Image (cartoon, rainbow, N blue to C red):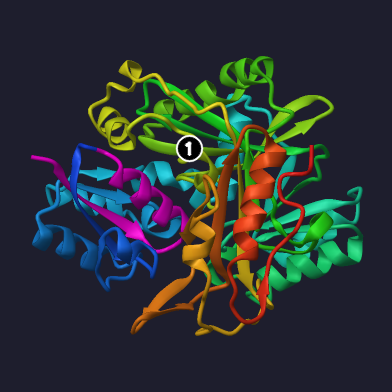
Amino acid sequence: MGMKVLVVGGGGREHTIVWKLKHSPLVSELHCAPGNGGIAALAECHAVDAVDVDGMVALATRLAVDLVMVAPDDPLAAGMVDALEAAGIRAFGPRKNAAIIEASKSFSKSLMKKYGIPTAAYEVFEDADKAVAWLQDQSMPIVVKADGLALGKGVLICATLAEAEAAVRSILTEGKFGKAGSRVVIEECLTGPEVTVLAFTDGKTMLPMASSQDHKRAYDNDEGLNTGGMGTFSPSRIYTPEMEAWCMEHIYRPTMDALNREDRTFRGVIYFGLMITPEGPKVIEYNARFGDPETQVLLPRLENDLMEIFLAILDNRLDTIRLRWKPESAVCVVMASGGYPEDYRKGHPISGLAEAAQVETATVFHAGTRRDGDALVTAGGRVLGVTALGADMEQARQRAYEAVSRISFQDAHWRTDIGIKK
């Protein structure tokens, strides 16, 4: 008898996780809450909000699932894993006291400082006037971050003192990010290319996944506003085996050990946002879960059974797993609603998905879609993540963009340069 699994969330990351679990012989039944138009083709979707802790516990109990996979940041920060475990339900993801590495940037910065994990120099403020006074003596550019969860948009890179002061006041005084902005972290602006490395851990073993690189800005050549991610590719061209060995010794394992020493053992996926500075790799941010859209290029390259890895982590036997990766490169291009990440319209019909799926190795992951009768319509800022594999990055790029060219919806917007940068 296979296992009955409930995946929490409704974006592109969750569609990719559901798609990968669908391949597992260990899984017999898949559910998702709330899901989306694409996930509905693979799993039974339930209208429970991803942050509704009590509702999710009730749903998991009613369905008698064997495992709940909590994918997004907000429910992890709210303690959904703790609540499920308290109800006797197995859950994949860190408990609330470990998910704080993403939920509070000031916590994660102080953890890195305490345990000597390489990161940017920083200060934390709750008072706007004090922050602005401190900024007078700092060199620009500088980075201003809302302390809490802000949909990937709470990081402002400020070129001038005036920009930095405005950023501080918009977060602390004007409440731009709500509760997420009750504190700001201001840090030195590191320079260098960014690399993302996700890692599985059960608190004893740390297994880094293949590297990837995200594209946060809305427009080509990294212009425009920061978004939740406009596309990604794997592997990174700059992340070498030597660099991985160095990061394992100085960043990955020390992070796992630091959390253990703080009595916050982390079981799940840690996302390491790295900047490769002239002095070497430094941590820009931690996330407490699979990245989005990084998952959309990593899981199609992963040869292992994902469910097998989840169970190994829950049973504290991750040391028995060896990750295996396809040698191909992967590129994911995000098709977004016109106007994203600011104002955009929803409800536009989407066409061409069947034609896109005909492109060799291409898979379309749904991020913001919903079913409207027989039609599929847009329902978010990021609508689709179009992923393709190739013998090299250029072939993966060509295939991904060929698939993108076959899909249409009103005001669709995407970057044309995903997978090019070094």
The reply to whether residue 328 is in sight is yes
Q: Position of residue 167 (x, y in %)?
A: 77, 66
Query: In this view of the protein, which residue sits in the foreground, 111 or 314?
Result: 314
Q: Locate the N terminus and report the quarter of the image it occupies.
A: top left
Instruction: Look at the picture and state if 305 lies above or below 146.
Output: above
Query: In this view of the protein, which residue sits in the foreground, 250 or 217?
Result: 217
Using residue 26 as the reference point, say whether residue 405 is left or right of it: right
Using residue 65 as the reference point, say whether residue 417 is left or right of it: right
Instruction: Look at the picture and state if 91 lies above or below 206.
Output: below
Q: As shown in the figure, which amino acid type bears the numbered disc 1?
A: Ile
Write the residue at 69% across / 48% down: 398
Query: In this view of the protein, which residue sits in the foreground, 141 or 327?
Result: 327
Q: Position of residue 203 (x, y in %)?
A: 37, 26
Q: Locate the C terminus and report the quarter of the image it occupies.
A: top right
Q: Position of residue 42 (x, y in %)?
A: 30, 58
Q: Is residue 226 a member of the stretch shown in magenta?
A: no
In which image quadrant can residue 249 be found? top right
Q: Identify the residue under disc 1.
A: 270
The reply to whether residue 214 is in sight is no
Under circle 1, the secondary element is strand
Using residue 383 as the reference point, say whether residue 3 is left or right of it: left
In which image quadrant can residue 313 be found? top left
Write the residue at 58% across / 68% down: 407
Write the residue at 51% across / 48% down: 296
Judge the density around disc 1: few (<14), some (14-19), many (≥20) Cα neighbours within 10 Å. many
Q: What is the count of numbered marks?
A: 1
Q: Position of residue 24 (x, y in %)?
A: 27, 39
Q: Look at the image and give the residue range highlighted in magenta.
A: 1-24
Write the residue at 69% across / 55% down: 216
